[in-house]
Image (spheres, rainbow, N blue to C red):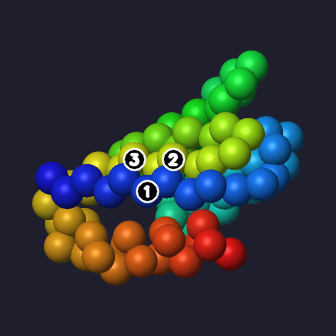
Amino acid sequence: MSDIHITRKHHLGLAGARKLALRWAETAGRKLDMDCTYAEGKSSDVVSFKRPGASGELKVTKDRFELDARLGLLLGVFKSKIETAILENLDQ
C-alpha cells in the first residue's frame, strides 16, 4: 500500500472550509465514484472517503486541510500523479 499525507493551510475559517470540503466530497462522490461521509464537529470536521483501491480522511479545521489517503496496489503505481492532482486541486 502507498500512503499520501498532505497538509495545506488556508484563511477560510471553519465555515468557509466546511463549505469547500462539502463541495469536494460531493464532487469526489460523483466524479471518482467515492463513498464519502461528512462528520461535522465543533472545532473540526472529517470527510471519510473510500472506493475500491483507495480510502482515507480529509480533516478540516479553521486554518488547514489535512488529507491522509491509502492507495491499494493498483492505484499505488500512480501515487505521484494522484498526489500531484490532489496538490493542484488544494492549491486552487
Q: CA distance from mark 1 to mark 2?
A: 6 Å
- SS under mark 2: strand
Cβ atoms under marks 2 and 3 closer than 8 Å: yes
Rendered residue at 47%/77% (across/down): 85
Residue 31 in the image: state x and y as whole percent.
58, 68
Cα separation between marks 2 and 3: 7 Å
* Distance (Cα) linking label 1 and label 3: 7 Å
Left or right: 72 in relation to 54: left
**Is 9 in front, or is 68?**
9
Count all numbered tags in the image, as a single digit.
3
**Percent of width and height locating residue 6:** 43, 56
- SS category of the residue bearing label 3: strand
Q: Provide the residue designation for mark 3.
A: 68
x 29%, y 50%: residue: 70
Q: Is residue 62 visible?
A: yes
Q: Please give the residue where the numbered disc 2 appears in the rendered image.
A: 66
Secondary structure category for the residue under label 1: strand
Residue indicated by mark 1: 6
Left/right placement of residue 7 relative to residue 75 reads right
Tell me if label 1 and label 2 are in contact, CB under 8 Å.
yes
Q: Quick one: label 1 or label 3, which is nearer the N terminus?
A: 1
